[in-house]
Amino acid sequence: MLSAEEFGLLFETFERTAFRLETLAVYDVEEEREEFEAFVAGKPMPPEWHDNPWVRSMTNRGKSVSRVHVLRSPLTDYLRYELSAYPGNITAGESIGIVDLAEQEVSGLPDHDFWLFDDTDAYRMHYTEAGQFAGAELLASDRLADYRRYRDTAQAHAVPFAEYWSRHH
């Protein structure tokens, strides 16, 4: 099981593509707590919200970063916060889609988060019940076909973020 620091190094070493499937309604990220509280209080968000430097650090090197967030309306405060940051990720070059299970049922998706790097390495993300990161597990190569299929299923059913947001915001 990789720690957050060890897992973070993968974003410097992948060569072409990084895909994430998100499934939680709340992520408890220590570095986001103050910003989240400011968001809920209606305060302005920092400048990096308009062009995410972390995403840009990858896309400026010609790497593709994408995600599909599987959620269910109505949105939690945390999801409103997270989705409000997505336009800055998109400006920085990330492709984001949304699958709202309140609008469509999709079979064939896992009930957990994962990252798929370069179509060759799949990592299952582990979280506590409160949404705190607990580690990333490199999955055996015989599971890659499953995780590629999960990615493809999620992308096939996802609505582009801008379309989803314009209907729900």
Image (tube, rainbow, N blue to C red):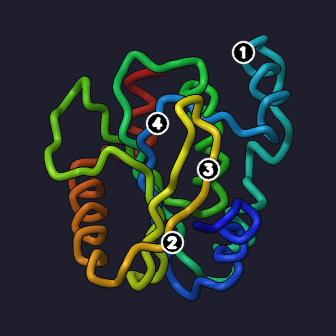
Residue 40, label in figure? 1
Label 4: state its secondary structure: loop
Question: Depth check: 110 or 49 in front?
Answer: 110
Going from N to C along the chain, the mark reached first, 3 or 4, is 4
Question: Depth check: 149 or 83 in front?
Answer: 149
Label 3: state its secondary structure: strand
Residue 166, label in figure? none
Q: Does residue 3 appear left or right of residue 129 in this picture?
A: right
State the image coordinates of residue 153 (x, y, percent, origin top left).
21, 58
Residue 18, label in figure? 2
Identify residue type, mark 1. Val
Going from N to C along the chain, the mark reached first, 1 or 4, is 4
Going from N to C along the chain, the mark reached first, 1 or 2, is 2
Dot 1 surroundings within 10 Å: few (below 14), some, or many (20 or more)? few
Question: Which residue in the protein does label 3 denote?
Answer: 134
Question: Which residue in the protein does label 4 denote?
Answer: 24
Identify residue type, mark 2. Ala
On screen, residue 89 above or below 38:
below
Please report the residue visible at 14 percent of the width from the left and 45 percent of the height from the top. Answer: 107
The quadrant of the picture occupied by the N terminus is: bottom right
Dot 2 surroundings within 10 Å: few (below 14), some, or many (20 or more)? many
Dot 4 surroundings within 10 Å: few (below 14), some, or many (20 or more)? some
Q: Residue 145 occupies which quadrant of the picture?
A: bottom left
